[in-house]
Every structure is written in C-alpha cells, then in structure tokens.
Image: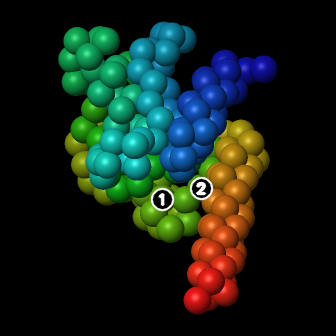
Amino acid sequence: MTEHEKFMNAALKLARKAAAEGEVPVGCVVVRDGVIVGRGRNRRETKKDALGHAEIEAIHKACKKLGGWRLHQCDLYVTLEPCPMCTGAIINARIKTVYYGAPDLKAGSCGSVVNLFDLPYNHKPELVSGLMEQECTEELQKFFRQLRERKKLEKQLRKQAQMNDLNEI
C-alpha cells in the first residue's frame, strides 16, 4: 500500500462513519509531513449546516492544530471531488496538493463540471484525481442504493398503513 492509499483509506473510513450516521459518505484528511493534521466527514444533515462538508471540517481542524490558516505544506485527500465551496476553501487555505477519489459529475469543481484551479487565482493547488476511484465510488453507490431501498420500503409501509386505516372505517 502506498502512502497515498494509506491516507485515502483514512478518508474512506471517515466516509463510512458519515454513512453510518445517515450522511452522504464523504471523508477527508489533511496531511503534513506524512501525519494527518485534520480529519472531516460530511455532517450537513447532522449539524443542519450547509457548510458541514468533509473538506471544510478537515481544513478547520488542520488550521487549529497547526495554529494558522496557511496550509501550504499540506495535502488534502477526499473521497469525492470537491464542490465549488470546498474548492474555494482549498484555494484560500493554500493547500499544496488535492487528491480525490470519485468524480462528482453534478457539482465537481476540480474538473468534472468546472476546474476552479484553472482560474487566475493567487494559488493553484496541484491536483491528482481518481485515487482509489473504484473504492470511493462504490461507497457512494452503496449509500444511495440503500437510501433508495429504504425510501421504497417506507412508501410501501405508508401505503399499507393507509389501507389498514381504510379497512377500519
């Protein structure tokens, strides 16, 4: 296992924890000199907060741990391609390199929909896409498959309850 895979596996572990909490499974770690200095997972539903993205949480924790907002010596590993908000945070934090697993064809801002790193901002992180893409994609697919199945079952149970109510009349 390469060092990059080790860090993406740490992000995947956080993604699985998010899924277990009913969140879209996205996990992220920020690494400096081979040590994880920030961890984050998706918590939008749990915190009822639009800013509850894995990258934002990991960057926030890394800044606190390192005592500053400039993370120019840090790399970021995330299971899903960052959205525009997270891409902006990555640029503003001066992250050195971004490694992501699964592409996000609906909101990905590191190449899928747009690549914000190509715009003339004052910082351009290096980008490595597709790191452990299959594993990251499978976690997302599994989560959404289970979500669809759960919604289908809930619909069937509601329908059955309505039928029972009608039969009691």
Label 2 SS: loop
Instruction: Please give the residue where the numbered disc 2 appears in the rendered image.
Output: 103
Q: Is 88 above or below relative to 56?
A: below
Task: Out of 153 and 100, give the one closest to the viewer.
Answer: 153
- First reached walking from the N terminus: tag 2 or tag 1: 2
Instruction: Please give the residue where the numbered disc 1 appears in the rendered image.
Output: 108
- Where residue 55 is drawn, which disc sits there? none
Residue 97 is left or right of residue 137, and the answer is left
Pinpoint residue 118: horizontal percent, then vertical percent. Answer: 38, 55
Tell me whether circle 2 and circle 1 mark residues in contact (CB < 8 Å).
yes
Q: Classify residue 67 by image quadrant.
A: top left
Numbered label tally: 2
Task: Out of 90 and 117, give the one closest to the viewer.
Answer: 90
Looking at the rendered structure, the kind of residue marked 2 is Pro
Q: Residue at x 78, y 20 (%)?
A: 1
Residue 31 is left or right of residue 19, and the answer is left
